[in-house]
Image (cartoon, rainbow, N blue to C red):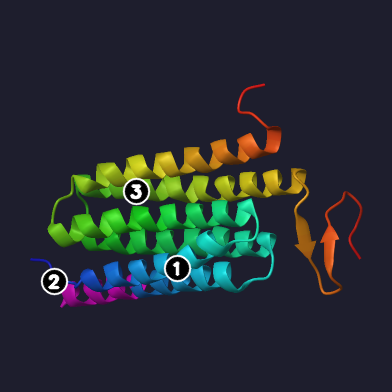
Amino acid sequence: MKTVIPFEIFLYILLITTSIVMYRIIKGPTTFDRIVGVNAVGTKTILFIVMISYVLGRPNFLDIALLYAILNFLGSIVISIYIERGGVAE
Amino acid sequence: MIEIIKSVIVVIFLIVGSLFLITGSLGIVRFPDTYSRMHASGKCDTLGISLILVGLIIYQGLDFVTVKLILILLFVFFTGPVAVNSIIRASFKSGNKMWTVKGWVQWSKERIE
């Protein structure tokens, strides 16, 4: 018998932090500010999927969260290498 | 009684992690420079997601779901700073300027006064 914790509150907190970071993505002066903002939004999206799996009571969503973590990491690495070298493969 | 103490610990972990996430978001918006924004993003986001996932692991107990949570925790804990470090290297190489007290300076190998 587990005690019930209202996880919906943390969903709203994650939405608020994501909308704060969205300001920097839209209005960032350079490209790197936008990349940092997208990386932060991806990090919050992982937590959002984990929280949704606890709200709905379906632990299958954790696989999607793990996949999204891998995709977020690869996206940041590939975009930064592309900007640094002017191309992914030399 | 033990359940109540455990849920109190879980809620404390979740609230501290959410505070770190809010601090990182405010740092991304409020800092003057790209590098300091990356500093806020790299530290606060990694610590916040780690604390929230540790709280969920304590809430779940020993289970098969815990293994997935531990995998997500380890992956994010090791690859979040690596991604931010890669973005910082790209920003250095392409000549992004840096904010100091005396003004905007270009990064170089010599020491910045």
Give the percent coordinates (x, y) of residue B52. 36, 63
Is residue B72 toward the left or the right of residue A50 in the image? right
Q: At numbered mark 1, what does the secondary structure look like: helix, strand or loop?
A: helix
Q: Which mark is residue B70?
A: 3
**Is residue B109 visible to the viewer in this orientation of the structure?**
yes
Nearer-the-camera pick, A53 or B34: B34
* Residue displayed at 12% across by 67% down: A2
* Residue displayed at 70% across by 45% down: B89
The magenta segment: B1-14
Disc 2 marks a residue whose amino acid type is Thr
| Tag 2 residue | A3
**Mark before the other along the chain sequence, 1 or 3:** 1
> How crowded is the residue under tag 2: few (<14 C-alpha within 10 Å), some, or many (20+)?
few
Q: Which mark is residue A22?
A: none
Give the percent coordinates (x, y) of residue B99. 77, 66
Give the percent coordinates (x, y) of residue B6. 24, 71
